[in-house]
Image (cartoon, rainbow, N blue to C red):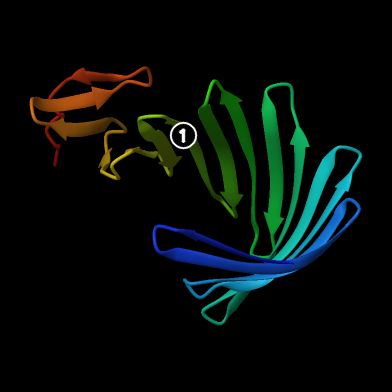
Amino acid sequence: REYDFSLNGKTINSSGERTGGEYSGSFSTSGGASGTVERKLDNGELQREMQVNRDGRSTEIDATTTRTRDGLETNFETSGGTSGTVNREVDNGTVHRSGEFTRGDQSASTDFVRGSEGTVGRIESGGETVGVDRTESGDLYAAKDGEVYRKTDSGWEQHDGNGWSTREPRAATT
């Protein structure tokens, strides 16, 4: 079977064969990446082996996804030495995704919530925190202090995880 997916001007072309609980296929993207995917469903776990190629570089990814009480948990390792865990929960149309990633002595954590008004999240690495927000209209706002702000016709607002409230951004320190 062949599939073409397009979103915001980006395209993924894929083809593959599904037999029982297994899938074997290949893909290419409009961004220049290509690769292969082997998937197998075994005792409720989705196991994947992928090889991704781009710009003359190649990496292999082994991942296992299991269903948890609240959603899904994916653990992965790459041939480049990166490993991590991503958790995903869905509640009334709101998706919460968090992750922990490690490569050598470096680590990062992420926490994102996507709902009807857009996406808000935080990325922490090396003692630094960055807040990010993407509205449904595509506007993106981030602050090095870890907070998320947006500019509206009536002034600045800050997102506190529960919604937006009026607040001027803190001045940058030097």
The answer to whether residue 76 shows anywhere in this view is yes
The residue that appears at 69% across and 33% down in the rendered structure is 72
Work out whether residue 95 or residue 2 is closer to the camera in this orientation and state it: 2
Residue 20, placed above or below residue 30:
above
Residue 129, placed above or below residue 157:
below
Q: Indicate the secondary structure of the residue bearing disc 1.
A: strand
Position of residue 92 in the picture relative to residue 114 (left or right): right
Q: Position of residue 112 (x, y in %)?
A: 46, 34
Position of residue 139 in the picture relative to residue 101 (left or right): left
Residue 95, placed above or below residue 167:
below
The residue that appears at 26% across and 43% down in the rendered structure is 139
The answer to whether residue 59 shows anywhere in this view is no
Q: Quadrant of residue 133?
A: top left
Q: Quadrant of residue 34?
A: bottom right
The residue that appears at 55% across and 72% down in the rendered structure is 33
**Quadrant location, the C terminus:** top left
Work out whether residue 9 or residue 125 is closer to the camera in this orientation and state it: 9
Q: Which residue is the extreme one toward the left?
A: 154
Crowd band around label 1 with a 10 angstrom C-alpha radius: few (<14), some (14–19), many (20+) = some
Residue type at mark 1?
Phe
Q: Position of residue 58 (x, y in %)?
A: 63, 74
The residue that appears at 65% across and 67% down in the rendered structure is 14
Position of residue 167 in the picture relative to residue 97 (left or right): left
Q: Which residue is mark 1?
A: 112
**Quadrant location, the N terminus:** bottom right
